Image: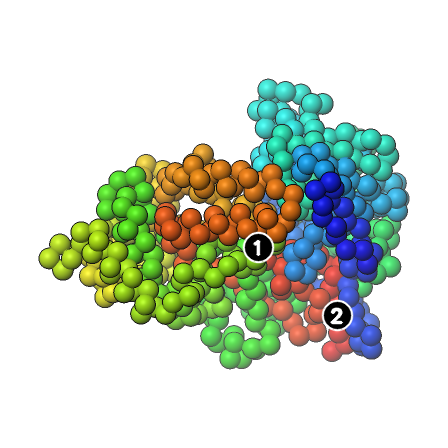
Amino acid sequence: MKIARFTLAAVALAVTSSLFAADVPPGTVLAERQEIVRHIKDEPATLDPARAVGLPEIQVIRDLFEGLTSQDAKGNIVPGVATQWQTTDNKTWIFTLRKDARWSNGEPVTANDFVYSWRRLVDPKTGSTFAWFAGLAGIQNAEAIAKGEKTTGELGVVALDKYRLKVTLDKPVPYFVSLTANFCLYPVPQKVIESTGADWTQPGSLVGNGAYQLQARVVNEKLVLVRNDNYWDNAHTVISKVTFLPINEESSATKRYRANDIDITESFPKNMYTLLKKQIPNEVYTPDQLGTYYYAFNTQKGPTADVRVRQALSLSIDRKIIAEKVLGTGEKPAWHFTPDVTAGFHPKKSILEQHTQAELNEQAKALLAAAGYSPAHPLTLTLLYNTSENHQKIAIAVASMWKKNLGVSVKLQNQEWKTYIDSRNSGNFDVIRASWVGDYNEPSTFLSLLTAGHSGNIAKFSSPEYDALLDKASRETKPAVRNDDYNRAEQIIAERAPIAPIYQYTNGRLIKPWVKGYPVTNPEDVAYSRELYILKH
């Protein structure tokens, strides 16, 4: 295996195929029938990568198609259709495609297929709900094309030859390669789409380049996939048949799982966690998810405009109690905004980890006193959250901590989603519940949220130093230096306290003991069926 080499001059990667398909240990006794049944939460709206809207489609599409890159069990980027890539400035990228990549009809997958597919993604005529992703990825002119201001031919992607793809970005994006694993950048078959039209995703018509092909589909009942013999790594795929069952009620899916009708659920009811852990402990998984639950402070007006007040409130939240007692379904305390599982992030210990909660409470009292608050002049504020049992439980717990530790009088206010969004957008709050799940697996998907121009900057935090730091990190080619930038950004968040990270998300599911290879350590929950296998049972 060749290891990635990073230098100022270039970035390149090439690995052997052994990283891709099912990794079956020697001596493993496999079931004769390698067939698996997977639960998805809803009927897929489409199987067209450019028109997908949510997770139900994405789970199936990942089996039917393959992008330039894929992810391993830990969420690290590994080659897909591309075997290697190079850049000297994080702005111009050249991908070399494998010559044995084939569509399910046997035709080769070429650089032109990606040019066509990416142009189609941003073409307003396609109406893709994920056209924005190409802009987020920084692909040259993507945003202007999606707005109808430029033509698709001006997109920054060209085929240098049959097996080399050149991508030009509007700005340096050091993590661009990780974005190419996203489903919306998968290639689609131009000839099939142009000859078949809207029906190209139907069984018998759909041509993909993934490990499986669509055999049958019964709307609201099942989708059946079978092996694609033309897939470049078909020899290392074990599962021969994948059936996806769309069931939107978690309790119904759990019942069918327990009746052995399903091998992997997409989720399970939170209120069944304790019971399931007691009855089938080895089948309950709560893998880390690329997401953080946090409180945002109003930095522009009211008592929380004072940084000392924000620091005090953040320090006095006992995150261990929230994660372990109030929630208790595998969540972890958030000592920083960026989740621990984020690729390329090596966090330094925050002040929250360096002191006991009692010590943090003492610091918080001193800060609040310095801000002019005392038993004679107590701090009063409003904590806003959107209606939800979990949000309410956390709000009650935090309000209790603030009252006990700091003497703060907290008014809890819950609003339905639309009203809550209006209040959030208008800045009509002191403290507000929020959360962020990463669009991609790199620290900037979280840290950029607090830059001055970001629409998701609920706290309206403004720091030229912070913005300059994120801009610097985006241009940095040395991962270690970029990580230092990200740690400094986290330090600024801790010092200025525009937000108070509370806990890191998990993504619970049930998996049968005979199913092996599920990547529970992947923070984006990317699970390709070609990585799975069934033990004899």
Reading the image, the residue beneath label 1 is: 345
* Colour approach in the figure: rainbow
Residue 49 visible in rendering: no
Which residue is drawn at the image coordinates 72% and 59% (left, top)?
A: 529
Task: Find residue 523 and report its image quarter.
Answer: bottom right
Q: Name the kind of residue labelled 2 in the image.
A: Ile
Residue 39, placed above or below residue 438: below
Residue 160, placed above or below residue 335: above
| Residue nearest the observer in this picture, 370 or 36 | 370
The circle on residue 480 is none
Task: Evaluate if marks 2 and 1 touch, with contact meaning CB atoms under 8 Å apart.
Answer: no
Residue 150 visible in rendering: yes
Q: Name the kind of residue labelled 1 in the image.
A: Phe
Q: Of helix, strand and loop, which one carries label 2?
A: strand
- At which x and y percent is residue 359? 32, 68
The circle on residue 534 is 2
Front position among marks 2 and 1: 1
Of label 2 and label 1, which has the lower sequence position?
A: 1
* Neighbourhood count class around disc 2 (C-alpha, 10 Å): few under 14, some 14–19, many 20 upward: many
